[in-house]
Amino acid sequence: MINQDGIINFYSENDFDIIEKEVYKKWIERVISSEGKRLGEISYIFCDDDYLLDINQRFLNHDTYTDIISFDDSIGNLLNGDIYISTERVRENALEFNEDFETELKRVLVHGILHYCGYKDKSDEEAMLMREKESEKIKLFHVEQS
């Protein structure tokens, strides 16, 4: 069952606007539910490389470009947090991995949620499991719930 009490926000600090917001929200709710978690409030903030690099430098002391940074404010099984996504980096990664932009965007959207669910990606084993979970959750995108 999907928790309808939670909130998913989409904000943009660049010119990107996610199409079919409600479809994406329902998918993210299914992903959260499939992991036995509940939706609190999750905000996605779309931005460019420089915006995300600034966050990476100021808050994480990393001087590298990245596609996603997630700040986890979850409490137990109630998922809350802010997920920053560089749409520039997502486009470049899609090209590099020979993937379409929308699929790569879904991978990054769900990546942050999976971190909130407890999945890590520091070691090779963790990264491999994370990729498997991302692929599994992307398949839920077109699943209709009754």
Image (cartoon, grey):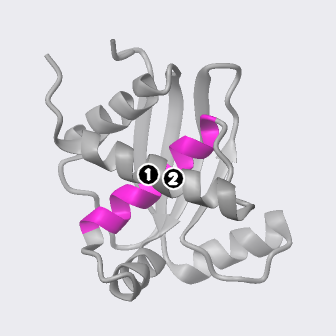
Q: Residue at x 46, y 52 (%)?
A: 132
Q: Residue at x 16, y 42 (%)?
A: 142
Q: Which residue is mark 2?
A: 111
Percent of width and height locating residue 70 = 63, 52
The span shown in magenta is 102-117
Residue 55 position by quadrant: bottom right
Q: Residue at x 37, y 37 (%)?
A: 28
User: Which of label 1 and label 2 is nearer to you?
Assistant: 1
Q: Which residue is mark 1?
A: 134
- Extreme-right residue of the structure: 61
Q: Quadrant of the C terminus?
A: top left
- Extreme-front residue of the structure: 125
Q: Judge left or right: residue 3 versus residue 41.
A: left
| Type of amino acid at the residue the image marks with label 2 | His
Percent of width and height locating residue 13 = 47, 67
Q: Judge left or right: residue 95 versus residue 63.
A: left
Find numbered disc 1 in the image and state the secondary structure of the residue it sits on: helix
Q: Judge left or right: residue 16 versus residue 117.
A: left
Is there a contact, CB below 8 Å, between mark 1 and mark 2?
Answer: yes
Q: Quadrant of the N terminus?
A: top left
Of callouts 1 and 2, the N-terminal one: 2
Find numbered disc 2 in the image and state the secondary structure of the residue it sits on: helix
| Type of amino acid at the residue the image marks with label 1 | Glu
Residue 4 position by quadrant: top left
Percent of width and height locating residue 124 = 68, 64
